[in-house]
Image (cartoon, rainbow, N blue to C red):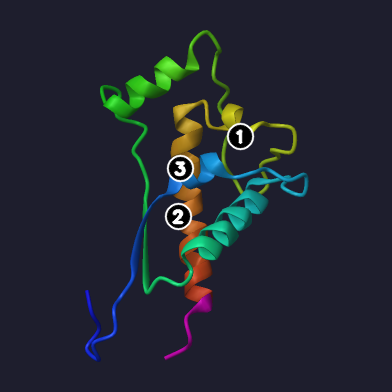
Amino acid sequence: MFAADGTPIRMSVIDAMAVVQSLDKPKQIRTCLHLAGHFICRTFEKYGDSNEIRLILDLYYIPTSRKQATCLRREGQQDPIYYRITPSTLITNVAMKKLLSHTSTKDELAKYLAEQTIEHVEKMEPEL
């Protein structure tokens, strides 16, 4: 794809939850707001030179989906714990794997990260 002036346009299509699952979780990440900031920072570090970034977010609430079946199989014998995702939700002592083990938590986190990313981008855009 090329711009009107002939320069190439770079678009990145990103599996947002794959990015989340690959994140390290430094000690300074204490809340979901901190996690969102870390997610946004890492995403823009890696893909910030793109002209366009598209975040792809999975649906976790469809009971018969292949994604849901995979999640259930990964849970195994553990009972997943649901965490309500808000900016102030404390996740200091929660491992990423445990945080992402409940499908409702994952769904809420995906929506929250999308909202936070949109807000971040809107603040970055120059006023027209």
Tally the numbered discs.
3
The kind of residue on which mark 2 rests is Ala
Looking at the picture, does residue 19 appear above or below residue 101? below
Residue that mark 3 sits on: 18
Mark 1 residue crowding within 10 angstroms, few (<14) / some (14–19) / many (20+): some
Q: Quadrant of residue 70?
A: top left
Is residue 32 located in the magenta-colored stretch of the structure? no
Frontmost of labels 1 and 2 is 1
Magenta span covers which residues?
124-128
Quadrant holding the N terminus: bottom left
Crowd around label 2: few <14 · some 14–19 · many ≥20 (10 Å): some
Disc 3 or disc 1, which is closer to the eye? 3
Distance (Cα) linking label 3 and label 2 = 14 Å
| Mark 3 / mark 1, whichever is N-terminal | 3
Q: Quadrant of residue 7?
A: bottom left
Residue placed under numbered mark 2 in the picture:
114
Please identify the quarter of the rendering in which residue 65 is found: top left
* Residue 73 point in image, percent of width and height: 41, 15
Q: Are marks 3 and 2 in contact (CB under 8 Å)?
A: no
User: Which residue, as the protein is rendered here, is positioned at the far top?
Assistant: 77
Viewer-side residue, 16 vs 87? 16
Q: Which residue is mark 1?
A: 96
Mark 3 residue type: Ala
Q: Quick one: SS at disc 3?
A: helix
71 relative to 19 in the view: left or right: left
Q: Is residue 127 magenta?
A: yes
Amino acid at pointer 1: Met
- From mark 1 to mark 2, how far is it between C-alphas? 18 Å
Q: Position of residue 91 (x, y in %)?
A: 69, 38
